[in-house]
Structure formats: C-alpha cells, structure tokens
Image (cartoon, rainbow, N blue to C red):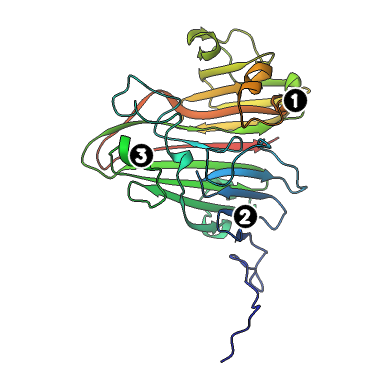
C-alpha cells in the first residue's frame, strides 16, 4: 500500500456525527506546547516547560493573561508571565532544611512536564465546570522524581520521591488550574505550592481588589512586616508584594468599578498580590516592556504561609478558578 506523503493530521479531539462539536487539542510542530480550543472559540495554551499556561483567550480572542515580551519560551529560563507553577518552595527558604539549596520558586517551573492526556465535558460530567452543560476541556500534565525532564537541581537538592499531577480546565467562562502533589517515598516531606498568575488589565491605576478586608498579610516591600488590610478595596499605587491570608475564599478584581475577574481558591490559604511598579520592573531583565506593569496584576493563590507536611503515601491538593465577570 502506498502511504500518502501529505496525509492530513486529524484533530486530537474531533467531532462525531450526531454529537455536539467538541474541543480540539493540538501540539506545536516542535512538541513544546499544547493548545486547546473550545467549539465556542475560547482557548488555552500550555508550554510543557514548567507546564506554564502562557495564553488564555476568550471567544473574541481577547487575551486574559499577561506575558512579558522578553519571556523565554525555549526552556532556558522560567517563563515571565502566564501562570508558572511554584513547587516545592515559594521564593527561597535558606533556613528550611529540605529546600534551602533550591533555586527561587523551586523546580516545577523549570522542568519539562509530560502531557498525560485530555478529557471533555462529556467525560467529566461530575465536574462543576460542566454543571451548565458548557463545553469543557481538561488537560493533564505530570512530573515526578523519575521524570526525564526534571530539573537536575531537584535531583541534587531535593531527594524525595514525588509525583505531581497538574490539570488545566477551560470552559467558556473560566479557567481552573489544580495540582496534586503525592509523596511516593518512605520519608515525609514539606512543601509550598503557588500558582503565579499574571492577570492582564488595561490600567493598573484603575484596579480595585475586593475580598481582602481585615486579612492579615506579610508586606515583603516593607521588610516582611506583619500587617492587616484595614482599607478596602485594595488599590495599587506603587510596588506591591504581599502575602495575604484572606478570610474570604474568593478575591474579585474590578477595573473602572466593574468586576473583571473572580479568583476562587480551593485548599489554598494564601493569596499573593504582586506588581513591580516602575523601579522594580526596570531591574528585571526579562520584564518587557518596562512599563508593562501598567497592564498586569499578579493574584497568586497558594499555600505558602506555612509548610505543608506530606506524609509517605499522602498527597496535598489545591486549585484556583479564575472566572470572567
């Protein structure tokens, strides 16, 4: 039999006669990223390096995440923008025995993850994202202590057996990212988890952040001082780097007085709010354009206020859902 030279590739998820249109999932030519698109037009793009979400667009093609113009997407450096995955340490922890020698934000964002597969709303009918019969696609990614793409620094400085499953779920009105960190070894480990979400905004000076009333926080711009959010809503008027422990499970970002995003946490007790403002942006080599701080706001759900102890055979799970308002 003669093989067709230019045989077309079918979509990863194709339409079946008699069934509603389904999502399509495709790979880039160099297999470095996965793109999922709903039949209604929304899309999400995930780089296998770091399992980093680098794009999320609504049905009209409007981008919802901020990505630096100088972001490295070739696996040479953690991505500046999108949604990098932070594990097993937030920032650096020089006094924590298990993670003191790891680079900033750990190794999950600097490892190449494996694409484990996809599912659609028809096969995840019990998922609350499909409760309104909206089309949904879920992408699963994996990283473990035995992964060939694991950052060598992990082997050298974090000798624990682990398995991470990271899922990215897209529907017309929201994006959910969730992580399950399992301890596959005989020894307990401690970890921190964070989803370093860069939201795209039109004007940072017109932003209000609701849902932080009376929340305690650590002010990293003020030498780590412990404070309480006494004014509400929060506005951004200069460099901001705060680790909140909110009482409310959702934070709402409004622009020009109109709600824009709602970020809901599941088993993640903290929210980091970050914007580098003028001077800090100038000092970050891969932050471009330098006035890009005007167009972005990091609202980062995580479990970073303390260490999460994961016993042998146990797992830590956490998730965020970003809803368009």
Label 3 Cα crowd, 10 Å radius (few <14 / some 14-19 / many 20+) = many
Front residue of 66/324: it is 66
Q: Position of residue 88 (x, y in %)?
A: 39, 33
Q: Which image quadrant is residue 72 in? A: top right
Crowd tier of the residue under label 1, counting other residues whose Cα lies within 10 Å: few below 14, some 14–19, many 20 or above: some
Question: In x, y percent, where is residue 192?
Answer: 40, 30
**Residue that label 1 marks:** 255
Determine whether, in the image, residue 306 is placed left or right of residue 273: left
Image height of 125 relative to 58, above or below? below
| Callout 3: SS | helix
Given the current orientation, which residue lies at the most extreme bottom position? 1
Query: Nearer the N terminus, badge 3 or badge 2?
Result: 2
Which of the two marks, 3 or 2, is nearer to us in this view? 3
User: Disc 1, disc 2: CB below 8 Å?
Assistant: no
- Give the numbered dot on residue 154: 3
Mark 2 closeness class: few <14, some 14–19, many ≥20 residues within 10 Å: many
Point out residue 153 in the picture as x, y percentages from the top left corner: 37, 38
Dot 2: element? strand
The circle drawn on residue 176 is none
Which of marks 2 and 1 precedes in the sequence? Answer: 2
Question: Quadrant of the image for the C terminus?
Answer: top right
C-alpha distance separating marks 3 and 2: 30 Å
Specify the label residue 36 is tagged with: 2
Image coordinates of residue 321 in percent, x first then y, are 57, 37
Q: Is mark 1 on a helix, strand or loop?
A: strand
Q: Earlier in the sequence, mark 3 or mark 1?
A: 3
Is 313 placed above or below 278 here?
A: below
């Amino acid at each position: 039999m003669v093989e067709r030279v230019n045989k077309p590739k079918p979509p990863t998820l194709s339409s079946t006669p008699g069934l509603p249109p389904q999502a399509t999932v495709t790979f880039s030519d160099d297999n470095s990223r996965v793109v999922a698109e709903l039949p209604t037009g929304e899309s999400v793009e995930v780089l296998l390096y770091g399992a980093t979400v680098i794009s999320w667009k609504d049905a009209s093609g409007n981008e919802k995440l901020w990505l630096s113009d100088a972001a490295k997407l070739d696996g040479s450096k953690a991505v500046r923008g999108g949604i990098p995955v932070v594990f097993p340490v937030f920032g650096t922890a020089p006094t924590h025995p298990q993670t003191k020698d790891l680079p900033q934000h750990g190794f999950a964002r600097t490892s190449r993850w494996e694409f484990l597969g996809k599912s659609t709303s028809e096969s995840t009918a019990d998922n609350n994202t499909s409760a309104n019969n909206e089309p949904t696609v879920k992408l699963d990614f994996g990283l473990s202590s035995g992964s060939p793409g694991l950052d060598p620094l992990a082997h050298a400085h974090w000798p624990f057996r682990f398995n991470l499953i990271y899922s990215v779920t897209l529907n017309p009105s929201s994006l959910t990212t969730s992580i399950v960190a399992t301890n596959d070894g005989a020894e307990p480990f401690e970890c921190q988890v964070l989803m370093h979400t860069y939201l795209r905004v039109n004007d940072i000076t017109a932003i209000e952040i609701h849902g932080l009333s009376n929340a305690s926080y650590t002010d990293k711009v003020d030498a780590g001082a412990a404070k309480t959010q006494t004014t509400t809503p929060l506005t951004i008027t200069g460099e901001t780097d705060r680790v909140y422990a909110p009482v409310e499970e959702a934070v709402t970002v409004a622009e020009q007085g109109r709600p824009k995003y709602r970020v809901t946490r599941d088993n993640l007790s903290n929210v980091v709010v970050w914007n580098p403002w003028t001077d800090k942006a100038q000092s970050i080599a891969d932050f471009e354009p330098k006035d890009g701080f005007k167009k972005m706001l990091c609202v980062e759900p995580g479990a970073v206020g303390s260490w999460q102890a994961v016993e042998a055979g146990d797992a830590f799970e956490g998730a965020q859902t970003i809803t368009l308002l």
